[in-house]
Image: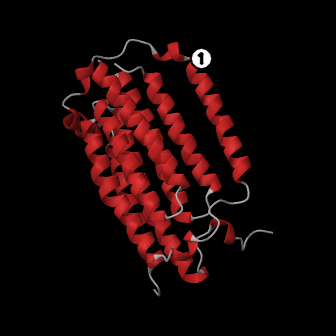
Amino acid sequence: MLLTQALFYFFAVLAVVSAILVITRRNAVHSAIFLIQALLAIAGIFLQLQAEFLAAVQVILYVGGIMVLFLFVIMLVNLDIAVRQVQFNRQWLLAIVTALVVAAEVGYGLYRGKEAFQFPAASPDILQPNAQRVGLALFQNYMLPFEIASILLLVAMIGAVVMAKRRL
Amino acid sequence: MIPTSNYLMLSAVLFTIGVIGVLTRRNIVIILMSIELILNAVNINLVVFSRQLGSVAGQVFAIFIITDAAAEVVVGLGILIALFRNRETVNADEIDLLKW
């Protein structure tokens, strides 16, 4: 019980601190490294919520795929000039105040409505074996969204090639 | 067992950090990274409700969101490369051709 709580707070603090570092670093490569750290912490939270398959997908797809793509683009686009420029735009104060107001609203609602989430939780082993359950749901109930997602990936691939190609 | 509202709080905090990143940064690469943070906050919500309700549907939707994030990043970074080739800038507030 104590170990569960300690792990949750460890991963939560790690994710939040890394996220704050992502949006404040001057160098985009540092931001990418801290984003990797935040994504790994969120993968730990998935693992703690007994979503093993999703944690593996998070590590392989996000950290292994998307972040490598980010780093490649950071190296392709010359960011040496951008490091020396002003990092925040003119509306930053208004933006922070607005976002914090929204956060306070959501946090107040969650704090006041804490009892609303206390309905009896399902037994924890109902999601096990996890990969098998997720696979069955994907290929039985969610077959059509799965196929649409594959078409979306095809469109994104063609779009990226068209965008990045110098001359068609 | 950690109560569901703690996970929702964590998700709200990550979402807010992502929103602040999108609204305040000038560098487009970091704006895209902040969008990744927002999508991950949503994923935490989906997975914790999947545990709470004992249904695997939340995790399936989280997988769809990861797919969407991959597609979005691929197209976004393609646009960024095309933009950098034409305008020589990565700052979002310097791309104001359509602004009156």
Where is A16 relative to A29, above or below? above
Q: Residue furthest bottom?
A: A167
The quarter in which the N terminus of chain A is drawn is top left
Residue located at (72% from left, 49% from top) = A93
Nearest to the observer: residue A68 or residue B78: A68
Q: Position of residue A20 (x, y in %)?
A: 51, 47
Protein chain holding label 1? A
Q: Position of residue A56 (x, y in %)?
A: 25, 45
Q: Quadrant of residue B91?
A: bottom right
Residue located at (62% from left, 34% from top) = A103
State the SS at label 1: helix
Badge 1 amino acid = Arg
Whether residue A125 appears in this view of the structure is: yes
The quarter in which the C terminus of chain A is drawn is bottom left
Q: Residue furthest right?
A: B100
Whether residue A145 appears in this view of the structure is: no
Q: Which residue is mark 1?
A: A112
Q: Residue furthest front?
A: A84
Where is A22 relative to A103, above or below? below
Please say which color scheme the image uses: secondary structure
Q: Position of residue B65 (x, y in %)?
A: 42, 47
Within-10-Å neighbours for mark 1: few <14, some 14–19, many 20+: few
Count every numbered label the image shows and give the total.
1
Q: In the displayed structure, does residue B16 sit left or right of residue B5?
A: right
Q: Position of residue A26 (x, y in %)?
A: 54, 62
Q: Quadrant of residue A54?
A: top left
Where is A136 relative to B54, above or below? below
Residue located at (37% from left, 49% from top) = A37
Nearest to the observer: residue A2 or residue B76: A2
Residue located at (42% from left, 52% from top) = A35
